[in-house]
Each structure stands twice: as C-alpha cells, then as structure tokens.
Image: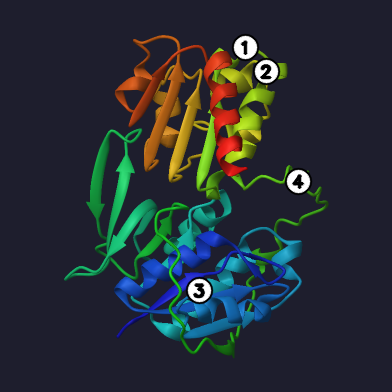
Amino acid sequence: MAEVLVYVDHVDGAVRKPTLELLTLARRIGEPVAVALGAGAAGTAAALAEHGATRVLTHEAAEYADYLVVPKVDALQAAVEAVSPAAVLVPSSAEGKEIAARLALRIGSGIITDAVDLEAGDSGPVATQSVFAASFTTRTRVSKGTPVVTVKPNSAAVEAAPAAGTVEALAVTFGALATGTKVTARTPRESTGRPELTEAAIVVSGGRGVNGTENFGLIEALADSLGAAVGASRAAVDAGWYPHTNQVGQTGKSVSPQLYIANGISGAIQHRAGMQTSKTIVAVNKDAEAPIFDLVDYGVVGDLFDVVPQLTEEINTRKG
C-alpha cells in the first residue's frame, strides 16, 4: 500500500487534534507516515503511533522556530523525495496553507485547499470541498504530480488505530531562502481556558444583536457551560465588541464544529461562508425573517437576552 505523508502540527511534542484527524483520513488512502519538525519532534511519536502512523520522520533544528515557513517547506520536500508518497496532507491553518502551496510549487504538483473529506479514487485521492461561500460542494482530485491537500479541522473524527510508529531521522538540507524571514519576537496568546476556535467541537457566536461588549458575557457564559469556543460576527468585531481573532466568516476564521450556535447574527453570506459546514446549526434571533434561519437545523425566534440565559441555566442544571 502506498504511503501518505502527514505534516504534524505540534507544540513542543504535544500533537494538536487536527493532525490526529489527518491520520484518520490518511488511512483511507494509504499508510500514514508522519513528519514532525522542530523542538519536541521525537516526543510526538507515541501519540502518532497510537493513531495510525507507521513511521515518524523527525528533524529538530532551530531554524523551524527562528524563521518563517520556508525551513518547513524544505523539510517536507525532503520527505517527499525520500518517501515518494501517494499524497501529502497538511492541516488547513493559515501557516499550513502557505506551507502546502509552497511545497506544491516546489514539487510541480497540484494542490487542494480546505478539504472537508478525503477518499481513495481510481486515479488518486478524491477530496470533497465546500466552495463559493459554501454554496456548492465539489469532489476534486489532483491530475498532476503528488497531491498536496490541506484539510479543515473537524472534518473527520479522531480514531485510534495503533501502528508501529517507528521513529526515523529525516535528512534535511536548508536552502538559501530558509533564513530569509526571521522571527524577531513572540508574544504568548492570552489563554481563556476555552478551546481554540477553529478546532473546537462546539462554537457559540454572537453578532450585532448582542449590542455591546458588556453583553458578550452572556455568550461566554453559554460557551463555558458547553465547553465551547466563542466566536463573533464581523459586525460585532467591527464595532469593537470582541477581538478580531474570534471573528467567524469570509474575512475571519472558518470553523466546522459539531455544533454551532449563532446568537443575534442575521446570517449574511460573509458569515455563512465561515460556518456553513458545521454539522448542526442552531440560531437565536428575534427576526423571524433573518437569513440565518434558511440555514439552521434548529431555530429559536426570540430575544437572545431572554433565551440565552435560560439555555445556559438549563445546561448547567442538567450538568449538575
């Protein structure tokens, strides 16, 4: 069976959930071979093996932390040349998509971004995408070279499938461009204790109807009762009520959780583009004609200031 390279997104050896999802998808089309780079790379082996990696190619060097993107592209190119894989899978983050695009150009291959599913095909892997602001679903395959595919978080359930996970050193030679852009400083992101927005299984969002920074406490309380991430519409972000890092939509982040709860959000196409692939969508809006209701699985016509506190209280009661 052909091997499939999976780029490992990790923090000092702690593997992030989207990578484990990629391993599940990789097993559908071949034998997963993980590529872990940077500090703590060797420490990823146990988690990767538990979820199906037959081999773990590792390389630790200061360049991965000190410089942007290009050293990782050099390493993935070396892995492609060493393995001759059937495909390369990368998490669909901002950095992941840049890495994937540069790699595809380097190896002369086609690229598919923001896939939401992946399956084996007669002429290579076939990816499912949600395109044109989620108005259409397409099934696509790369017709030239080794397919490079970025996959949205929450596109597949994480499944344990113990494999050998043999750790092997990857030989990497950095090119002249690897040190072209240097990281001069880092500021740790302030932790809220909530899941990362794009990886969360549940997202609770607020929009124009929240009507102020002080009222986002209602949204946060509901999110905390569910162990969810907090999102916001562009209208709420532009008004300064919530940080841009939490914006969901065409000009913000794209999410695909198991459950998405939209509160006081009208459902403009720009917002829908960032959340329409959510598995179950619930909306609370006092306007029965709001476009968001065309999209939802469950809709509540009512004032969010009445509905959300009651919902939060009921959830907390059931949990207690």
Number of on-image labels:
4
Q: Residues within 10 Å of mark 2 (few under 14, many from 20)?
A: some
Give the spatial CA distance, label 4 vs label 1.
25 Å
Which label sits in the foreground, 3 or 1? 1
Q: Residues within 10 Å of mark 1 (few under 14, many from 20)?
A: some
Q: What residue sits 40% from the left and 41% below the top? A: 278
> Residue 225: which quarter of the image?
top right
Give the spatial CA distance, label 3 vs label 1.
49 Å
Q: Earlier in the sequence, mark 4 or mark 1?
A: 4
Amino acid type for the residue under numbered disc 1: Asn
Residue labelled with disc 3: 77
Q: What residue sits 34% from the left and 10% below the top? A: 289
Which label sits in the foreground, 3 or 4? 4
Q: Quadrant of the N terminus?
A: bottom left
Which label sits in the foreground, 2 or 3? 2
> Residue 287: which quarter of the image?
top left
Amino acid type for the residue under numbered disc 3: Gln
Amino acid type for the residue under numbered disc 2: Asn
Residue 241 against residue 151 in the figure, above or below: above
Furthest-left residue in this view: 122
Give the spatial CA distance, label 2 vs label 4.
21 Å
Residue labelled with disc 2: 215
Q: Residue 14, image x and y in percent?
A: 66, 68
- Pointer 1 with pointer 2, Cβ within 8 A: yes
Q: Residue 102, image x and y in percent?
A: 50, 59
Residue labelled with disc 1: 211
Under tag 3, what secondary structure? Answer: helix
